[in-house]
Image (cartoon, helix red, strand yellow):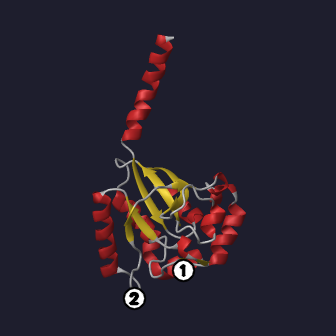
Amino acid sequence: MKRLLLLLLAALLPALAQAQDLAKATFAAGCFWCTEEAFEKVPGVVSAVSGYMGGQKKNPSYREVSSGGTGHSEVVQVTYDPKKVGYDKLLEVFWVNHDPTVLDRQFCDAGSQYRPGIFFHNAEQKRLAGASKARWERNKPFSAKILTPIEPAGEFWPAEEYHQGYYKKNPARYHFYVTGCGRYARLDELWGKYRSK
């Protein structure tokens, strides 16, 4: 029995060591289905989990959050390997995948639960997010002011399983949603050539 436990421990140690080297980043960019898709395509991202942050209720349901009464935002929590992708790259992906000129809405989705935001997990993320926002404010390809806030991360509540990987599980419905909502058309209008990088 001791030998079995030691073998199991030896097998798990590399995975535990690797897990310790991972980092988290959290972004709100409107509908979490779309945000999840954008981040899952980035090399070095281990996972992108749809969920909720910034509200008062513990473990809220989608129905509660979508009513607008809990104070949560739809967010995606990204787990990434900093040896393969930097937080600055994740910020680049975030900026060109949301409309930073509006509050309490993104595209056809309206309400405080769709407000954009960067939720930092440490002082370095806060610094990098602030510098990134300032850089875009100076070099943005549109005239409107950038309104996206930078806030400390709170407790993260994963969304229900049917929301996870929605774009992969329901590709036809997802395509209908993003095109009908005008998401990509608006992003291309705002960000132009930056969207293709």
Residue at screen point 38% across, 53% down? 85
Q: Which residue is mark 1?
A: 186
Q: Is residue 116 above or below residue 120?
A: below
Residue at screen point 50% across, 73% down? 115
Residue flagged by tag 2: what amino acid is it? Ser
Q: Is residue 93 left or right of residue 135?
A: right
Residue flagged by tag 1: what amino acid is it? Arg
Mark 1 vs 2, N-terminal side: 2
Question: Quick one: quadrant of the C terminus?
Answer: bottom left
Residue at screen point 41% across, 79% down? 147
Q: Position of residue 42 (x, y in %)?
A: 46, 56
Q: Which quadrant of the structure image shows residue 25?
A: bottom left
Q: Which mark is residue 5?
A: none
* Local secondary structure at mark 1: helix
Viewer can see residue 49: no
Q: Which quadrant of the structure image shows residue 107?
A: bottom right
Q: Position of residue 46 (x, y in %)?
A: 47, 48
Q: Position of residue 14 (x, y in %)?
A: 41, 30
Q: Which mark is residue 143?
A: 2
Residue at screen point 62% across, 68% down? 66
Q: Is residue 87 left or right of residue 100?
A: left
Q: Residue furthest bottom?
A: 143
* Local secondary structure at mark 2: loop
Q: Is residue 188 above or below residue 10?
A: below
The span from disc 1 to disc 2 (Cα, nearest Å) is: 14 Å
Viewer can see residue 35: yes
Is there CB contact under 8 Å for labels 1 and 2? no
Please tell me how crowded label 1 is: few (under 14), some (14-19), or many (20+) other residues with Cα within 10 Å. some
Q: In the rendered picture of this protein, how many numbered marks are placed on residues?
A: 2
Between 160 and 164, the one lying in front of the other is 160
